[in-house]
Image (tube, rainbow, N blue to C red):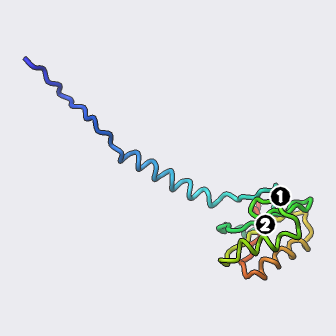
Amino acid sequence: MALQSKNKIEAAFSMSSMTDIIFLLLIFFMLTSSFITPSGLPVNLPSSEASDIVMQEVTVSITKDLKYAVNDRQVSRNEIKEALTTLLKEKKGYVVLHIDQEVPVEHLVEVGGIAAALEANVTIATKPYK
């Protein structure tokens, strides 16, 4: 007399739930990565009432001790124009300025003028009021 099991176990592995989880993780990381501000240098941003989020293509950071960085790469003040020219030569995009609130305005105007001369849209990064 042969005994048969009522529950049959399939040896096949269903990938549908695994692809759903991977798809949801992909969407989560894509959305959260746009809110991260990659700034290679620690900058204390000024506050503003209208703090918009802009897709960052090129970032320029200036710390309070006047250290410059373009896209997390530390450069000197004289190398900013060369760095922005190479990054913006093929496309005209956004340049987001991460300027410490203690930096004199002349440095902001200088870097903003270089980016504007390269026909880029210049945006100043701020943090919202608390």
- Image side of residue 41 versus residue 23, left or right: right
Location of residue 104 (image quadrant): bottom right
Asked whether residue 122 appears in the rendered view, the answer is yes
Give residue 102's quadrant in the image.
bottom right
Label drawn at residue 64: none
Left or right, residue 47 beside residue 32: right
Residue 122: % across, % down: 75, 75
Residue 53 in the image: state x and y as whole percent: 67, 66
Q: Is residue 20 depicted above or below 85 in this figure?
A: above
**Residue 12, position as x, y percentages in the image:** 29, 39
Give the residue type at disc 2.
Val
**Which residue is identified by label 1?**
44
Indicate which disc residue 60 carries: 2
Q: Label 1: few (<14), some or many (≥20) within 10 Å?
A: some
In the rendered image of this protein, does residue 60 appear above or below residue 8?
Answer: below
Task: Residue at 10% x, 20% y: name it.
Answer: 2
Category of crowding for the residue at label 2, using alpha-carbon neighbours closer than 10 angstroms: few (below 14), some (14–19), many (at least 20) = many
The outermost residue toward the left is 1
Q: Quadrant of the C terminus?
A: bottom right
The amino acid type of the residue labelled 1 equals Asn
Front residue (pair 28, 111): 111
Q: How far separated are the C-alphas under marks 1 and 2? A: 14 Å
For the residues carrying marks 1 and 2, which lies nearer the camera in this image?
Answer: 2
Q: Secondary structure at mark 2?
A: strand
